[in-house]
Amino acid sequence: MKIDSIQNGIVIDHITAGRAMDLYELLGLKNVECSVAMLMNVTSSKMGKKDIIKLDADIPVDLDAIGYVDPGATVNYIKNGVLDHKQSIRMPKMLKNVIKCKNPRCITTVEQELDQVFKLTDEEHKVYRCLYCETQAENK
Ligand code: ZN
């Protein structure tokens, strides 16, 4: 794909420089069929440096995962070569099946089919805790 011209797809823009890899992992982008381009340390007038991820297809992306890694990111949906709409991102109150609880005694470690649910307990410090055992998630 030509990096600059996506016909139909998704551009995740304004990612804090250095976070694109984390997002790539959390969104499971290594498993998608479409082309994925990661641009890192792009010069931005607003942010100094930023990362960008481009997906060459309109695949479902988990906006909560994006909000968890970087609530300042924006998601642009491209249709027929032009911007169709923009989606701004917020820090999600709940995270479902985005991250895993690290507590070996947590019920989600034992019962693998349970959803991994985390609740935002401190918005200012971006603290998420497991709904079941209240273990704090490592910050991404
Ligand atoms: Zn837990």
Image (cartoon, rainbow, N blue to C red):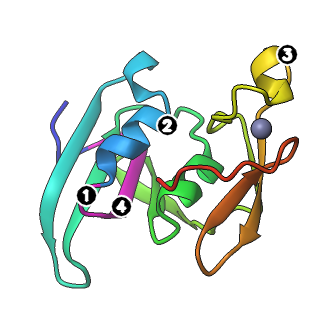
- The spot of residue 94 in percent (x, y) is 78, 55
- CA distance separating discs 4 and 3: 37 Å
Is 11 positioned to the left or the right of 4 in the image?
right
Q: Residues within 10 Å of mark 1 (few under 14, many from 20)?
A: many
Other residues around mark 2 within 10 Å, as few (<14) / some (14–19) / many (≥20): some
Q: Which residue is mark 3?
A: 111
Identity, as a three-letter code, of the amino acid under mark 2: Leu
Judge whether 28 appears above or below 70 on screen. above
Q: Earlier in the sequence, mark 1 or mark 2?
A: 2
Question: Is the residue under label 2 in contact with that under label 1 (CB below 8 Å)?
Answer: no
Badge 3: residue crowd in 10 Å (few <14, some 14–19, many ≥20) = few
- Structural crowding at the residue carrying mark 4, measured as other residues with C-alpha within 10 Å and reported as few (<14), some (14–19) or many (≥20): some
Q: CA distance from mark 2 to mark 4?
A: 16 Å
Which residue sits at x=85%, y=16%?
111
Mark 4 vs mark 3, foreground winner is 3
- Nearer the observer, disc 1 or disc 2? 2
User: Whole-Å distance between the Cαs marked 3 and 2?
Assistant: 21 Å
Q: Which mark is residue 51?
A: 1
Q: Earlier in the sequence, mark 3 or mark 2?
A: 2
76 or 62: nearer the viewer: 62
The answer to the question of whether label 3 and label 2 lie on touching residues, with beta carbons closer than 8 A, is no
The residue beneath circle 4 is 13
Q: Amino acid at mark 4?
A: Asp
**Do the CB atoms of the residues marked 3 and 1 lie less than 8 Å apart?**
no
Residue 73 lies left or right of residue 98; in this view the side is: left
